[in-house]
Image (cartoon, grey):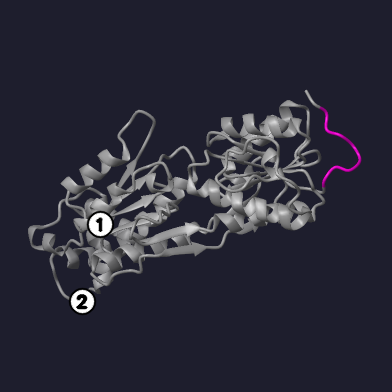
Amino acid sequence: MRARMSDIARQAQVSEATVSRVINDRPGVSHETRQAVLTALDVLGYERPERLRKRSAGLVGLIVPELDNPIFPAFAQVIESTLAQHGYTPVLCTQSPGGVTEDEYVEMMLDRQVSGIVFVSSLSADTAADPSRYRRLIERPLPIVLVNGYAEAIEAPFVSCDDRLAGDMAVSHLVALGHQRIGMISGPNRFISTQRKLTGYRAAMEREFGPGSPSSLPSPFPQPPSIYDEFVALTLFGVEGGEVAADRLIEQGVTGIVCASDLMALGAIRAARRRGLSVPRDVSVIGFDDSPLIAFTDPPLTTLRQPVSSMAVAAVRCLVDEINGHGAPHSEYLFRPELVVRESTAIAPSRRSLPVA
């Protein structure tokens, strides 16, 4: 039992004596410390003593799209630790191609009588998905909070990074370096994040270079067509999608590329190098997220950083307020991204054309 006490104390960051007092239901321990010890018991898989089980704040579901993109584990880590600080035991659900779907995970969570669910980049972010799945949860009623998944038809708290501003800031940075032919790579246009980043990109391009005239090419976007649509490549999220899209943009003579994720940006760098080009001497690349280890890529990536910690803490606070009946505002909390300048962007190449493979 002493070995277990040591494990629990280490997990809860308290002394073994404090763990003993909590397990034996003795006074002299603050509510926050008691909840930290009880959460440590749950996380380590120890069964709570019978007399303490009624003190459990309950389970909370956390559903993320996948773990391949390091931004999602980053969100999960902060959300889980913040839930634990509030006395809740997080249940992490991750999706993978061909695996358990979001709806199936929700059913599992309902069977376990969770107190609420945090969704990160869920189906709500897909404008082609049916939002009624979330309305049914709210009507149960079950508290939910959606991170980076705004949908106007859902009455719930939303926590989002300002994608419009991110698109604008990325273009402004490249313009300051002298770039004029600036492209954008993002995922399918049905995602609200893509639509917002595109809006920011186009607004910045039109502010810096004028509205121009509509492209003669058919526009795949719901907004009015713009001459700059020719420098937008929509593809699959991920390194491979970024590489394919960047190859097309580089062939069009683009010298600066704004990417909707860090992984896409890594694909864009790969495409440039495959053509014998240097990043950033020939092509500048900007990512989005500032996921872990991105500062150590070759070259270190300039990116728009999502304020993961602030967003995750805000999401948990909203959910806890909902669970406690305080009713968090059913609106979207927008968090400002931060431009992190590293070595993948530089002054635009001048008076020379880019070689085409």
In the image: residue 347, left or right of residue 64: right
Quarter of the image for residue 221 reads: top right
Q: Could you tell me if residue 31 is visible in this image?
A: yes
Q: Residue 74: image x %, image y %?
A: 46, 50
Q: Position of residue 301 (x, y in %)?
A: 66, 46
Q: Residues within 10 Å of mark 2 (few under 14, many from 20)?
A: few
Query: Given the current orientation, which residue lies at the most extreme left position?
Result: 50
How much space separates mark 2 and mark 1, taking CA atoms?
39 Å
Q: Which amino acid does label 2 sit on?
A: Gly
User: In the rendered structure, does residue 142 fall within the stretch colored magenta?
Assistant: no
Labelled disc at residue 28: 2
Which residue type carries mark 1? Ile
Mark 1, other Cα within 10 Å: few <14 / some 14–19 / many ≥20: some
Q: Residue at x 24, y 72 (%)?
A: 31
* Residue 205 in the image: above or below residue 355: below
Locate residue 189 relative to residue 110 in the image: left or right. Answer: right
User: Which range is magenta?
Assistant: 348-355
Q: Residue at x 27, y 68 (%)?
A: 33
Task: Residue 319 in the image: state x and y as whole percent.
Answer: 31, 62
Q: Are marks 2 and 1 in contact (CB under 8 Å)?
A: no
252 to the left or right of 14: right
- Which residue is more in the foreground, 50 or 98? 98
Q: Is 26 located above or below residue 96 in the figure?
A: below
Query: What residue is rendered at 56% in x and 62% in y?
Result: 336
The numbered dot on residue 138 is: 1
Residue 357 to residue 148: above or below: above
Q: Which of marks 2 and 1 is nearer the N terminus?
A: 2
User: Hey, which quadrant is residue 305 in on the image?
Assistant: bottom right
Q: What element carries label 2?
A: loop
Identify the element where label 1 is drawn. Answer: helix
Q: In which quarter of the image is the C terminus?
A: top right
Q: Please identify the dominant SS of the magenta region.
A: loop
